[in-house]
Image: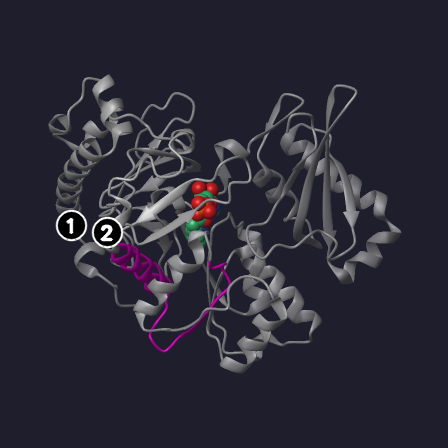
Amino acid sequence: MPIWNAEYESMERPLLRELQLRRLQAMVSWTYERVEHYRRALDALGLKPRDIKRLEDIERLPFTDKQTMRETYPFGLFAVPLDEVVRIHSSSGTTGKPIVVGYTKGDLATWTELTARIASAAGVVRSDIAQMAFGYGMFTGGFGMHYGLERTGATMIPASAGNTERHIMMMQDFGTTVLVSTPSYALYIAEVGEKMGVDFSQLPLRLGLFGAEPCSEAARREIENKLQIRVTDNYGLSEVMGPGVSGECECQCGLHLNEDHFLCEIVDPITGETLSPGEMGELVITPLTKEAFPVLRYRTHDLTRISSEPCECGRTLARMEKVRQRTDDMLIIRGVNVFPSQIEDVVFKIEGVRPHYLIVLDRKHGLDDIELRIEVAEEVFSDIMADMLAFTRHVSERLHSVLGLNVKVTLVEPGSIERSAGKAKRVLDRREGC
Ligand code: DLL
């Protein structure tokens, strides 16, 4: 497959590092001169932009987190006057004020270039017909991927999220070849299609560009089988741009980071110390070319590891492992640390379990209670009904052996767990204060 921008995506790594250093120096000056918050934070550390002499000096810079972004709501971290801002996006703000991010014309041009790279690396070509199932709105997914896909020359169908039957009708009538969505919505589209009697193997659909939430290998395989497509993963977050940070190439062995635009570090999530290359930790991102909303060392809370080993595709950009866990989605249940992805990995390996589940947490008599609601495939549901107890006990034992916790397992009817047109909600925490 040709590389979208070989000059940068296949740059020799020593040259890439030189470019990163130059851009980092310019970015630190830009933020210091234009954003009060960063000027104060650097001054408090006795640091000046000229102190950044090597890439490693990034470790001397302060971290930025969501809290800072909330405190400066809505435009306090913008580095340009609103006159120069041509677009605003924001997080959903379900837990307080949303985080607002802005883009200049130049930022939008960069964003388009980077999402075009992601689409192209995943295998999109100009003859493709791409159907957007991310929402267009304050969420960065829809608009972000839209312009990149258009830039590749593919035909865009801006369908947006929801209205699943219409999605399926358009796939059939327009000959859609690429679906752009969250993996959980893709699963739902498959499910609705099945009910409508659609044979996806007869449709031209061939490729999925999925992101915005974790996707286990089991879910990936299920989508591949059901929709008869190749599933690719791409990653990003609003605070540093949106989609366009990293994405899989055809080798599907990690997500290439657009390192000419993002300087990435892996730190210990507790101490903030930089970890050695290849170690698993929290991803910290410093965008190197942002104009309106520059950010220094953003703590993503996403856990991954980075490898700069060469990739067979010819790109020299380092690869990050798929993100499966966030430091802040760790649940503490009776003192035991549990990630939803651990539960998912156990149950998805059990024959007949569908990739739809909900973890429900309660506190009874001062003690945490964990219930796992899972769906099983229609065809096994009735067989299992006969031996429901044995089946739930089996799942519960498997969970106990991995987590060391007693999990109450409840089988629910196929289709009864709420489906989402965006990011799936996997945890319902009903404990006090949650
Ligand atoms: O989800 C941006 C995006 C849109 C990326 C479309 C890819 C495709 P936010 O809504 O700000 O932005 O959410 C960012 O979502 O910190 C991760 O925890 C999670 N996330 C995003 N992509 C992936 C992925 C967009 N491929 C947060 N795998 C991030 C796992 C992901 N988690």
Q: Nearer the viewer, residue 165 or 99?
A: 99
Q: Position of residue 265 (x, y in %)?
A: 31, 35
- Judged left or right of residue 154, residue 213 is right
**Could you tell me if residue 317 is visible in this image?**
no
Residue 380, quarter of the rendered image: bottom right
Residue 334, quarter of the rendered image: top right
Q: Earlier in the sequence, mark 2 or mark 1?
A: 1
- Calculate the distance from the C-alpha at mark 2 to the C-alpha at mark 1: 7 Å
> Residue drawn at (50%, 42%), measured in percent from left and top?
324
Is residue 281 highlighted in magenta? no
**Which quadrant would the C terminus be assigned to in this image?**
top right
**Which quadrant would the N terminus be assigned to in this image?**
bottom left
- Identified by mark 2, the residue type is Thr
- Judged left or right of residue 7, residue 99 is right
- Identified by mark 1, the residue type is Glu
Q: Position of residue 384 (x, y in %)?
A: 82, 53
* Label disc, if present, on residue 433 of the rendered structure: none
- Find numbered disc 2 in the image and state the secondary structure of the residue it sits on: loop
Q: Position of residue 49 (x, y in %)?
A: 15, 29
> Residue drawn at (23%, 18%), measured in percent from left and top?
45
Per the image, the residue denoted by label 1 is 12
**Could you tell me if residue 369 is visible in this image?**
yes
Q: Position of residue 288 (x, y in %)?
A: 23, 43
Kindly give the residue lying farthest to the bottom in the view shown: 173
Q: Nearer the viewer, residue 381 or 237?
A: 237
Residue stretch in magenta = 108-136
Residue 347, quarter of the rendered image: top right
Proximity of marks 2 and 1: CB atoms separated by less than 8 Å: yes
Kindly give the residue lying farthest to the front in the view shown: 83
Per the image, the residue denoted by label 2 is 316
344 to 234, vertically: above or below: above
